[in-house]
Image (cartoon, grey):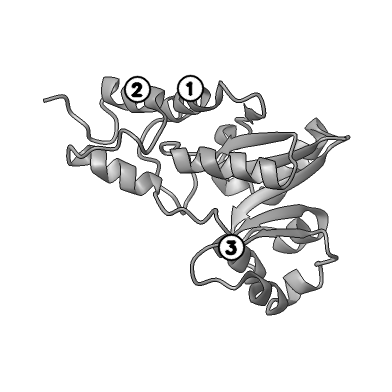
Amino acid sequence: MAKIGIYGSSFDPITNVHLFTASTIANRCKLDKVIFLPCSNKRKDKTMNTEDEHRWNMLEMAIKSDEKFTLDNFEMKQDAWKISTYDTMKHLKTVYPEDDLYFIMGADLLVDIGDGKWGSADKLVSENKFIVMARDGIDMLKAISGSPLLRNNDDGSTFHLIDKGIAMEISSTYIRDEFAIGGEAKYLLPTSCYKYIKENELYGWKNS
């Protein structure tokens, strides 16, 4: 039985922080594999800043040298208003029926789930396991104990909390903003992705 982390995000674009996070979690949690799961461009709560093809191409470039990293386009192919994380995890369990799956997320998302803001939140929590990363200002233990949904499904193995040394704050938004104003983001994302963005003039970057 393998231990697999499911790492969902828009990856718009993927950053070195994404890679650092995935690598650190794989090491600390003894994961055999981390699946990068780019979200659908049809989500109501997010606006993608480039086409799916570009996001996918950059992900492939970024992870190709790490044997523990792989990609899955299940959510990217779905209509976002018809799919939830619960559905995604249910699907992935059919793909990896013999393995132990963990959904990777930040503490801010744990709070949202505990508040019932996610689709099928009750089944999501009761049927899955989570690796939760610290976020500034969020007490993860308090978030769990303060939510009936979370605390009543916490059997000691549901939530694996990572509270130190991983809360890095350089975001995809920051990188997009730098490209848009002609700033320098060279060392914030993989070199291959940096070159790809410039070659394809993504995120408002123009070759002067």
Q: Secondary structure at mark 2?
A: helix
Sooner in the amino-acid sequence: mark 3 or mark 2: 3
In terms of image quadrants, where is residue 153?
A: bottom right
Question: Residue placed at 51% from the left, 56% from the top?
Answer: 167
- Residue placed farthest to the left in the image? 208
Q: Is residue 189 left or right of residue 1?
A: left
Q: Nearer the viewer, residue 176 or 117?
A: 176
Which residue is identified by label 1? 61
Sooner in the amino-acid sequence: mark 1 or mark 3: 1
* Percent coordinates x, y for residue 24 in the rendering: 61, 44
Which residue is identified by label 2? 196
Query: How far apart are the alpha carbons under marks 1 and 2?
Result: 9 Å
Q: Secondary structure at mark 1?
A: helix
> Which class describes the residues within 10 Å of circle 2: few (<14), some (14-19), or many (20+)?
some
Q: Is residue 154 left or right of residue 24?
A: right
Which residue is identified by label 3? 107
Q: Secondary structure at mark 3?
A: helix
Q: Nearer the viewer, residue 183 or 24?
A: 24
Sooner in the amino-acid sequence: mark 1 or mark 2: 1
Q: Nearer the viewer, residue 3 or 204?
A: 3
Q: Is residue 42 left or right of residue 124?
A: left
